[in-house]
Image (cartoon, rainbow, N blue to C red):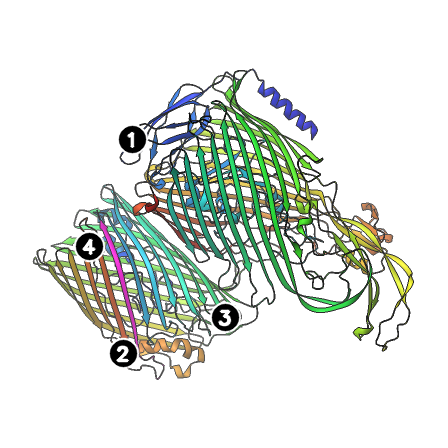
Amino acid sequence: MHRETLVACLAVAGLMGAPQLAQAQRATVVGVVTTGTARAPVPGVLIAVEGTALTATSDTLGRFRLVGVPPGPQVLLARRIGFAPTRVPLTVPPTGEVQRDIEMAEHALQLADIRVTADVSGRARGESGTSTVVEREAIAHQTASSVAGVLELLPGVPLQPPGLDGIQQFALRSVPTGTSASLTVGGPSAGAIGALGTLIVLDGVPLSNNANLQTAGPRGESSLPATAGGGIDLRQIPATTIERLEAIRGVPSARYGDLTQGVIVVDTRAGEVTPQTTARMDVRTLEVAAIGGWRLGSSQTATGHLTVARTNSSPGFADNQATRVTTQLSHRLARPAGSGTPSGASLDSRLSFFQLFQDNPEQTNRPGVSSSNRDRGLRVLERLRIPLGTRTALTFSGAMDYTQRRTVSEAPRVRGASPFTSRIEEGRQEGRFVQGQYQSAVRLDGDEWRLYHRGELDAAPTWLGMPHQLRVGLELTREWNAGPGYVFDIEFPPQVQFNGVQGYDRPRRFDAVPPLAATAAYLDDRIVGRLIGPITAEVQAGMRLDLLHSGRWWFSGVRDAVLQPRLNLQVAPGSWLRLRAGWGRTAKLPTLGQLYPALQYYDVVNVNWFADDPAERLAVLTTFIRDPSNPDLAFSLGHKREAGFELTPARGFTMALVAFEDRTTGAIGFRPDHGFLTRDHYALSDSTLGTGVPPTFVEPPAFTDTVPILIERPANILTLENQGFEVTLQLPRIVPLGLSIEAQGAWMTTEFRSDAVDFGRTFNDFQFGTAPRAPYWDGIVRKGERALVTYRLVHHQPRFGLVVSLTLQHVMNEVLENVAATDTLAFAGYITRTGTLVPVPVERRGDPEFADIRVARAGVTAQATETPADVLTSLQVSKTLPFGGEFRFYAFNAIDRLGRAPEVVPARTRSWPPLRFGFELTAPLRVFVP
Amino acid sequence: MRTPVLIGVSVVVVGAAAGQALPEHRPFEGDWMLRTWSAFASIADLPRSGPTAPVPRGAIGHPAATEGLWWSSGNPGALPFALTNAITVFEAGRTAVNGPYRFAMEPDDMSQFGVRATSWQPLGRSGGAVGAIVMDRTAAGVRPYAATLVPASTDPFIVTDTTTPEAARLRVRLEGAMGWRLGPIGFGASIGLENDDHRSHNSGFQQVGRTAIPAGRVGVTYRAGRALHVGVHARWIREAQTLLMGPRPDEGMIFQLAGYAEPDTLVLAGGFGYFQRAERYARAHGVSATGTILGTTWTTLLERTRRNNRYFYQVIFDPPSDRWIADGWTMSGTVARPLGRRFSVSFEAWRATVRGDATVADLEGALFRANENALKLGATVRYAPAESRLSVEAGYSLWRTRRARYDFLSEVGMDLVTWAPGGWLAGGYRWGRSQVQASASMASYSSVGSIPDAAQMGPVYQRVLAPEMAVAASRSRPLHTMLSYGHTLSNGTLLSVEGTLRTVSAGTDGAGGFTPTGQRTAWSIATRVTVTR
């Protein structure tokens, strides 16, 4: 890997110094802003070149002029209160002047060039890697309840019905294989690893789930509606408040860290926004939102939004309900030139709050079973941008996140008569017997805090005759949890498997868990220029260093460090073709729960004297405590590669194909470290029944044996490999029919494996019996494959403000497979009662001496599950209404396909996509327009 | 096929009367504005309904109907010839139905609130477009019926149960048509999608269902001057309906009716639920023509209809299924001509036939057979001089059905001919920017023939089918009245409000004690905004 890093650095250095790159080139863009219908000039429109600081304002005749625009694909963004924001993509030549007029309308739906799907040729701001850009109108037309619904516009993402039902986590370029990394204990699934490694950036500051400790751990038997160990629950971000979304599927720039899969950049609506309210309703979901942004004097704007949503997951059958409330206040202070501060200095402030409740109350057919997860979050964000000259700016970002999580789970449990102790320290103690059914109740009360700081210098110098877009930054992150923690009555625990093999948990305070401190520094440069003749090239190269500190703050020692080179190349032989490639390394921080796992308790029974008369019973237990934390735990590493091309043979016709390989190594799972405990057996002084008193045990112990145990220790043992290709196709608009056709598809395979060995279910029997040894097996490799193509047919009638889009998603292939031998010769070796692993070569596994460990591997299904092809249909209709309103209708699974059936196990059972439909009304609040 | 409804009555869209509505494919009655050209117009089905009175055509705020292929056959190829100006109608209304004189599988009472927007728009000189959206919510009271299946269609497969939960349905329907003309040739298409979600509430026995109905129609027409305009068309409807029932916590019994024989009883208890999936597919193709000869305008339509309904009860691939396969013909004709400058007269005739067989998965051969036909004859005289503020219309209609239905399993059948002659009187008056319209109509319903002797049938038949048979075999006298008022604003926008009342009372008992008593009343009120450009 270090060799690859060196090669990449040399490549970057070589390209930066490539003599072929021509001299600095900038062009001028001019045009006129008019209304769409009357062609009247629109003055006072702010036109910006997206991703740069270049802006201009249209004059009284609607004319504008932008000087110094970088060559290549650019997007002009035009805004004025009372008009829909307008995006105009264009290709800027290296030099000279290009004319591009802009059409504006009160309703975006009345614009001829409106895009209600993802921009297949769009670029994330400041990024050269493969990305998908989704703008406001596409988000609105998608009628999604959360950001998860917007992500369906990405290639390879299955359609899901809108609503808040179920936790919504997202993994870029991954096929969630569903099952966990281990069969014997709970472990992260491929989906959880992928979602944890997909970075969500909200308003320029990353979100994090690293301090989330809301889990019962690998030994817990409770099912909790929480998201610890996985990605952010995307339900907390309502779609109605999103202005723009960028999904960086390829190699992100060095600016982004704490990821392995990719980056989702979400910008919420801010600045001047026409006040409006939106109401959406379907049978399960009711959602109301209000938003407005006003200019306060010449230098300030203030924006506010409020959303309230509720989803009943399965009305009529269960009362499970998710509710969400979000609000945000944004303020922007932009000092004009000449007022004592440098021209264009700005201060952005945002105060955000979300409340996301998932309540699963008791159902009549499952008495005693209930759970809930109640999250509340508060975020304060400040961003100060100080221009240093015309092409350089210094930006300081700071954010403080506080998330309060309250998770409750109750369930009835039944246990047999067993010795019990409530001891929470190591040592021997007389216990008692417990037995029968009880109601277990678990509470996890976490208060997560996060501090994030970033200082970034953004400059556009010209060095060696080449234009550069340079970014240098430093990030400081500190995360901790100050909650009361994991609480339950020890006598009525959430697990009944007191077998001593895997241990169990005691209540734990979260505020005793040390914080996580990390530092990152990065350098990123982007160069665009002409190579030979019409051939242009773009290079984005960067280096990022992430440090995980061993102490509580950023000045403490370094526990682990990862250097992450990133490189993206693009060569365009002409305006009709772009060849692109990217390579890079990424790193993901361990979570608090992985760095500081809960202590494992083992209550070893020394005396088990069970008499009919409870007064005569005697139980003596010795409590052992093992700390499963792993001092060697380090970053998970992501290795990303991609290559592809983008073809634009004619106006409106675009085809892009990219092949990728994302490999996550050292992802963190639970490694069952084997060991043993010593167990003293005592003789009883008098075991006569009917005395009414228990016997006493005789010191010293009569004999001592060993108890094999497994310690579930977090370790960098998992590997997740995703590879495949994505293709997007946009055909020219069929003007007479007002019809646009797009297609995007993806074929992906995922391979998920663990380096740890699997002790299977026989280990439990081994613990209680007298067998001298037990078999173990190699880890199971889980594979997933999915191929799907999504067609979008968009009919647009600007005259009527009508957009109808029909989405057909053809799931061509879906295969899930566990690769593992399950026969009696599949074992890899055996473990002794003292915890020694003895591997057995394949050729000797049939020998008579191993007859006792030649057992079938239980609980493993090694058969592939293949699901036949099917097509899912979704319909969206958007229409302008009088008085500035809009109406939207959506139907998911509109023609109600019954669903697909896996061809093998489980045999002939259909997956059953729901039918959801609803409508949305948006009305302007004109009374609040100044 | 008829639009599925939550309950046994037709819940017509806002602005029209509700209750024991007539089948949607009778083109000269009810809310014709959405029906004639609708992609959802019924195919190869003659749903049974209670006695109704005829309804005069037209309402304040709706575009004036003219004769032509678009209006008579719904051929979208005729659309560019039919539209002359743009009109948009927004409507909102409420309908309530109650009273004990009903089929057993209808609710005691029900109410519906809905909104509708319809827009007609010429597209340049050679095109036209129509679009509509309807959203409504229906709340139904207690009834011994499970969910949304049409309980009185020609198809005999019905699911019922012993519970009586209240239920609600949310429905959205979108449809649109576009047509273009190239000289004398017109071509066009209409498509539609209807989704509904229905579920019980306030009940310990859960009933949840959903329906998706995509439908489409294509047509080509040729216009040979004013004398002749001919067209061919084809249309299809695919309906997917899913029903789930769960005993949580109450238990219940399910009856899968497939005719008149006593069905097997499925007891739902514990964690076991019930699933049924209905996939109904119907298609039709036909020819139509219109023209004017010697001042008389005539239209005619001939259509071949086919239907294939499939029901299954397991969530697996290629499940065994029950089937209803039917075919039929629909034909209609009208003749209209002015009588002088003040009067006009029109005659209409419409006839439809359906013949179908039902088979079940575990038996060979037909289990049930239906052979049904319906005939309507009508005559209308209108007094509507252009210079007069007053307009008057009088009409007569004769509605006849014959339903021969036979259950091969129980060897029981019915052969019933019903007659419903009726008439109406309607009038309108304008003054200034205001106008008022009123109508009253009545019919005399009677029948001859035979129905199964309910006393000899099983308890399930007596419970859910016998009351319907009894209503069909009884005499009654349905009434219909309507009053509407409209006011035109200075910008030409028309505001109107319309109220209707329908009643039908129990007459003679035709089935020995199984006939419901009392009265069934449906009233509705609708407000309408009509914008014309």
Callout in the foreground (4, 3)? 3
Callout in the foreground (1, 3)? 1
Is the C-beta separation of discs 2 and 4 under 8 Å? no
Callout in the foreground (2, 3)? 3
Kind of element beneath mark 1 = loop
Callout in the foreground (1, 4)? 1
Question: What's the residue at 30%, 43% (across, down)?
Answer: A800
Callouts 1 and 2 in the same chain: no
Q: Earlier in the sequence, mark 2 or mark 3?
A: 3
- The residues colored magenta run B512-533
Q: Is residue A99 above or below residue B408?
A: above
Whole-number angstrom distance, CA of label 1 to CA of label 3: 64 Å
Q: Mark 4 — residue?
A: B66
Question: What's the residue at 12%, 56% (across, down)?
Answer: B432
Secondary structure predominantly adopted by residues drawn in magenta: strand
Q: Is residue B72 left or right of residue A734?
A: left
| Camera-nearest residue between A382 and B273 | A382
Whole-number angstrom distance, CA of label 4 to CA of label 3: 52 Å
Q: Position of residue B63 (x, y in %)?
A: 22, 54
Q: Mark 2 — residue?
A: B475
Q: Earlier in the sequence, mark 4 or mark 3?
A: 4
Q: Mark 3 — residue?
A: B204
Kind of element beneath mark 4 = loop
Q: Earlier in the sequence, mark 2 or mark 4?
A: 4
Question: What's the residue at 54%, 54% (across, down)?
Answer: A166
